[in-house]
């Protein structure tokens, strides 16, 4: 008991001493999930942000109104829990007094945290959340990923045109609202186009499931022209492999959550030749995108996934908005308001996931590309669709 | 005289202080939200203690009942008092939100109590670890049922509770959420305290000691089990309702088995069958979770490690099965809490 | 229709095998100590990671052919994983047991140990998922519209073998007799000259060793490893063990296949969104009517 008390006191003390007081810095908060359901998403976000910070601080800092500011990024773990995301958000806004917040990534955390950001008048940019509620009626909340109602039709049109598909099957993650939302939009659009009942199987599974044999048996038995799999890449690796093991030889198509190089290490040969819609094609990447991918790979040992790229863009957008603000006064309220105005002033932002601008809801207007996984495991550009 | 009213006095001062500080914005929203989650955790851990501690059962699906309370209270509140995409214009005048709010939260509690029957009926025959599985199954069933109700958002979650809080604040400007959380926390602890010291409470204790002997001594074990499970899950529902309104958004994924184990840890940290232990553990646990934030991933290594070490030194939890007044008899001179 | 049923039956058998393998470990420890070892699912995860490191070491660093690696992997994974299990027992559970703590405090300690295993893994190896290298060539066989792979058959056969071995150990050997004696009366056993702590260590060796084997097979069948992979399957295997009647080897085995079958069949013949709802309702009903599972013995209470 006494030891616990001493440990407890020591921790408290070290925390109190650890709070740095720095002048001329710009503090940006990151509300990300380093533990819990999706630790990989948080890690990617953190790595991308660290790289960006090192870049800008290495170059002397961010120039705002003719003055160089060092960047200070504060990472808060939201444990993939809604309540933790809310307290982390409040902590960043009130205790750490950040100018803006990047994250949370998953809609489960982004929707409640967005409410807090909006109420406390702080700009929040979620890199990855796709739930419309996250930004709806919230002038202070933005996002970097495109929404399901845009991506769904892209997949439908591509499949109908390229595969000549008359029927489709969908397998999605019931507890993941990204996956569920996209699956529903896909079904709706596909049936509008090809007639009712053309989605012959609409099967779900749980978030941590590893066995999809029953769902796939049902799907394969209905003989669809192709299977749409709007899932995270770790599950995709298992689903594709199991579908092949059950003797399915047809097409499988996916969404932007496939867009990780880790897909290829996990999935191997069976994923080669498949298509998915995403933000950018890594294989044909040029300029800033290629540079980002190469450097990230060199620093952390693996190719960045879509979350890393989107976090990079989301953070860059925030920095752009700060520069647009023109001058930082040091008064938090004024500065945050200036950053919001700066966000709204962005007419076109050239990110590594494509150029984008924000509509009145704070959602990005950007192009989607469809890529094919080549025989060497690269994501090759097939088609680009712009809204 | 002082002894009789000291607890009331302390609570009133504490509550008044928090409300005053919150009203004048001396106390930041961050601290306030941590305090509110602390209140919710107190409700959850002390209500679970009723089953796991006093009655000696092993329930690991407490978050399921919390989920029922959260959804019922949220849907009811939004339907009645807020403009929403699902339900359209509010049914009642938003001015009444303030008065109806406790009723809404209680309605969530009642719904959760009814869901508690899911566990109460099998508990007549099933005991011990087999009952534990039934509680886990109940947790999964509730979450899965809500994920399948697309009318209230399914796995996308449900929101709009902010509108109800705004309606309350528009009527009388006060920090209503902290006030309600405070009131309901006191209410829950008081109800549990009254319950365990009543004749029913003696029956609960008898069941935990020896169920067969209790039955022979004319304790109606089935009735007492039903009431205890319903009370416990009902209070969890109240906690869930408050949780939903603090967050302003609910999602079935927030009430999974991990949330249940978190509550379980608080109960055993405090000590089985000790109300003050549960309260203390809930407070400590919430603070620990917030304090260790800067450790990020390491935090979830440190917290279990601290708990394991604590268990090694106090294998019966912080308070054992004793109350504050029993551990420190001298304190008894200064307060009485019934 | 018939091939659909057979196909689903094979799926159910394979998926149930994993539940059964993990449930066996739960039930073994429970049978001896009445301890719900909630860290067991995470020991299984550690087993999969150990298998991964052993396999990549031999395959990539030494260039040994796949089947030799597999032959080396099986004993090495089992030994290393059982070391993890025994360490947990020695450091966390035994001191508590010696202090005479209520068994539920040991359960909570087990839960905490599981959390530590998960997050230590996350902190040390990072959040990137690991891809388990293919050790044997997978063949897809197709007989009359029903397809299965050699790996699936191997998994099912292993589950049956493990069950037979454990059943033999518990019912036919001296160690097994000592285990049953401990579960019968923990206080009289040392008086009979049976080394209590040693038998408990052997129990943990067996339980965690087979969890390691399950981890290896799981990693081969579902080659995506992550720190949280053991949490959910661990909980479900615990449920399976209890439904079968916890403390009984046959119960865990049957419970594992039962849970696997329910989950697969619900998905196959009902809307798959209702899987958890229907599967757990079935379990709830089973436990209401058979309050001690299939093989559990109702405790007679002395008055």
Image (cartoon, rainbow, N blue to C red):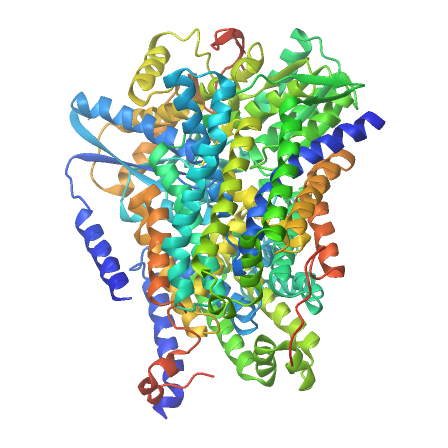
Q: Quick one: C26 or B33, which is closer to the camera? A: C26
Q: Is residue A205 left or right of residue A54?
A: right
**Residue C68 locus on image (x, y percent):** 49, 21
Identify whether A9 is placed above or below C249.
Answer: below
Identify whether B226 is placed above or below C12.
Answer: below
The quadrant in which residue A96 appears is top left
Name the residue at the bottom extreme.
B1
Identify whether C21 is placed above or below B192.
Answer: above
Q: Quick one: A89 or B219, which is closer to the camera? A: B219
**Residue A239 locus on image (x, y percent):** 61, 25
Please tell me how many numbered marks the rendered image carries.
0
The residue depicted at 76 percent of the width and 17 percent of the height is: A194
Name the residue at the right extreme.
C1
Quadrant position of the N terminus of chain B in the picture? bottom left
**Residue B20 locus on image (x, y percent):** 34, 67
The residue depicted at 55 percent of the width and 19 percent of the height is: C136
The residue depicted at 41 percent of the width and 43 percent of the height is: C83
The residue depicted at 50 percent of the width and 77 percent of the height is: B190
The answer to whether residue C184 is seen in the rendering is yes
**Residue C132 locus on image (x, y percent):** 48, 25
Q: Is residue C123 left or right of residue A305?
A: left
Identify whether A139 is placed above or below C240.
Answer: above
The answer to whether residue B251 is seen in the rendering is no
Q: Is residue A103 left or right of residue A158?
A: left
Q: Is residue C197 left or right of residue B84?
A: left
Q: Quick one: A280 or C250, which is closer to the camera? A: C250
């Amino acid at each position: 008991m006494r030891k616990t008390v001493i440990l407890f006191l020591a921790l408290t003390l070290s925390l109190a001493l650890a709070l740095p007081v720095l002048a001329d810095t710009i503090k940006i908060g990151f509300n990300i999930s380093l533990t819990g359901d999706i630790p990989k998403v948080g890690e990617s976000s953190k790595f991308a942000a660290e790289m960006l910070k090192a870049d800008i601080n290495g170059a002397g800092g961010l120039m705002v109104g003719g003055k160089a500011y060092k960047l200070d990024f504060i990472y808060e773990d939201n444990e993939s829990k809604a309540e933790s995301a809310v307290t982390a958000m409040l902590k960043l806004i009130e205790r750490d007094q950040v100018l803006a917040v990047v994250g949370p990534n998953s809609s489960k955390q982004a929707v409640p945290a967005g409410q807090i950001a909006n109420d406390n008048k702080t700009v929040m940019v979620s890199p990855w959340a796709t739930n419309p509620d996250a930004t709806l009626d919230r002038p202070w909340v933005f996002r970097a990923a495109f929404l399901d109602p845009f991506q769904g039709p892209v997949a439908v049109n591509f499949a109908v045109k390229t595969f000549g598909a008359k029927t489709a099957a969908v397998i999605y993650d019931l507890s993941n609202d990204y996956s569920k939302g996209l699956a529903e939009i896909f079904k709706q659009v596909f049936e509008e186009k090809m007639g009712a009942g053309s989605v012959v199987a609409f099967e779900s599974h749980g978030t941590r499931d590893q066995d999809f044999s029953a769902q796939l048996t049902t799907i394969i038995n209905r003989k669809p022209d192709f299977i749409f799999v709007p899932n995270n890449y770790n599950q995709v690796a298992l689903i594709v492999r199991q579908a092949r093991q059950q003797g399915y030889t047809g097409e499988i198509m996916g969404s932007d959550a496939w867009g990780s190089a880790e897909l290829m290490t996990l999935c191997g040969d069976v994923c080669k030749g498949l298509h998915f819609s995403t933000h950018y094609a890594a294989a044909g990447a040029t300029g800033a995108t290629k540079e980002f991918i190469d450097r990230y790979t060199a620093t952390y040992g693996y190719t960045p996934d879509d979350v890393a790229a989107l976090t990079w863009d989301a953070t860059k957008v925030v920095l752009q908005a700060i520069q647009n603000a023109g001058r930082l006064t040091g008064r938090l309220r004024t500065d945050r308001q200036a950053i919001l105005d700066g966000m709204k002033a962005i007419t076109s932002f050239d990110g590594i996931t494509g150029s984008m601008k924000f509509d009145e809801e704070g959602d990005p207007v950007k192009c989607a590309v469809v890529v094919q996984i080549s025989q060497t495991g690269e994501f090759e550009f097939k088609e680009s669709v712009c809204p | 005289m002082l002894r009789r009213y000291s607890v009331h006095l302390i609570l009133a001062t504490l509550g008044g202080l928090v409300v005053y500080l919150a009203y004048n914005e001396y106390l930041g929203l961050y601290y306030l939200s941590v305090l509110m989650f602390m209140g919710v955790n107190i409700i959850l851990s002390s209500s679970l203690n009723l089953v796991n501690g006093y009655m000696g059962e092993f329930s690991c699906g407490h978050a399921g009942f919390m989920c029922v309370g959260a959804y019922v209270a949220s849907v009811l509140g939004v339907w009645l008092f807020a403009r929403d995409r699902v339900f359209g214009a509010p049914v009642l005048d938003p001015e009444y939100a303030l008065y109806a709010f406790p009723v809404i939260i209680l309605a969530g509690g009642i719904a959760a109590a009814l869901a508690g029957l899911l566990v109460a009926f099998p508990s007549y025959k099933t005991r011990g670890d087999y009952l534990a599985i039934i509680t886990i199954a109940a947790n999964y069933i509730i979450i899965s049922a809500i994920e399948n109700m697309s009318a209230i958002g399914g796995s996308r979650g449900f929101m709009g509770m902010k509108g109800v809080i705004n309606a309350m604040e528009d009527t009388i400007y006060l920090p209503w959420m902290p006030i309600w959380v405070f009131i309901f926390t006191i209410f829950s602890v008081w109800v549990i305290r009254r319950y365990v010291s009543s004749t029913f409470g003696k029956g609960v204790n008898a069941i935990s000691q020896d169920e067969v002997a209790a039955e022979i001594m004319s304790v109606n074990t089935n009735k007492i089990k039903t009431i205890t499970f319903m009370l416990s899950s009902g209070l969890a529902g109240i906690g869930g309702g408050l949780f939903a309104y603090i967050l302003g958004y609910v999602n079935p994924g927030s009430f999974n088995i991990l949330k249940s184990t978190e509550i379980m840890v608080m109960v055993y940290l405090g000590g089985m069958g000790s109300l003050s232990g549960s309260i203390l553990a809930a407070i400590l646990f919430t603070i620990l979770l917030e304090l260790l934030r800067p450790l990020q991933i390491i935090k979830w290594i440190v917290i279990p490690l601290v708990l394991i070490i604590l268990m090694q030194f106090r294998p019966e939890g912080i308070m054992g099965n004793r109350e504050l007044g029993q551990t420190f008899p001298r304190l008894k001179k200064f307060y009485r809490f019934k | 229709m018939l091939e659909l049923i057979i196909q689903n039956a094979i799926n159910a058998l394979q998926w149930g095998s994993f539940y059964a393998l993990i449930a066996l470990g739960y039930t073994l420890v429970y049978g001896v100590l009445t301890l719900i070892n909630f860290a067991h699912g995470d020991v299984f995860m550690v087993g999969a990671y150990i298998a991964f490191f052993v396999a990549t070491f031999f395959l990539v660093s030494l260039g040994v052919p796949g089947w030799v690696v597999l032959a080396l992997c099986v004993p090495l994974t089992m030994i290393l994983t059982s070391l993890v299990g025994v360490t947990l027992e020695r450091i966390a559970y035994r001191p508590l047991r010696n202090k005479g703590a209520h068994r539920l405090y040991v359960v909570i300690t087990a839960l905490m140990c599981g959390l530590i295993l998960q997050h230590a893994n996350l902190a040390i190896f990072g959040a990137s998922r690991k891809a388990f290298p293919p050790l044997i060539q997978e063949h897809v066989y197709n007989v009359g519209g029903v397809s299965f792979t050699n790996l699936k058959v191997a998994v099912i056969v292993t589950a049956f073998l493990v069950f037979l071995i454990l059943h033999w150990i518990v019912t036919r050997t001296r160690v097994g007799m000592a285990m049953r004696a401990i579960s019968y009366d923990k206080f009289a056993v040392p008086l009979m000259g049976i080394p209590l702590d040693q038998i408990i260590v052997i129990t943990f060796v067996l339980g965690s060793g087979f969890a390691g084997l399950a981890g290896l097979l799981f990693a081969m069948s579902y080659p995506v490893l992550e720190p949280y992979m053991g949490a959910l399957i661990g909980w479900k295997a615990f449920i399976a063990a209890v439904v079968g009647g916890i403390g009984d080897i046959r119960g865990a085995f049957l419970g594992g296949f039962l849970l696997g079958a329910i989950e697969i069949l619900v998905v196959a013949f009902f809307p798959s969104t209702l899987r958890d709802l229907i599967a757990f309702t079935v379990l709830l009903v089973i436990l209401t009517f058979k309050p001690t599972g299939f093989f559990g013995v109702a405790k007679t209470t002395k008055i």
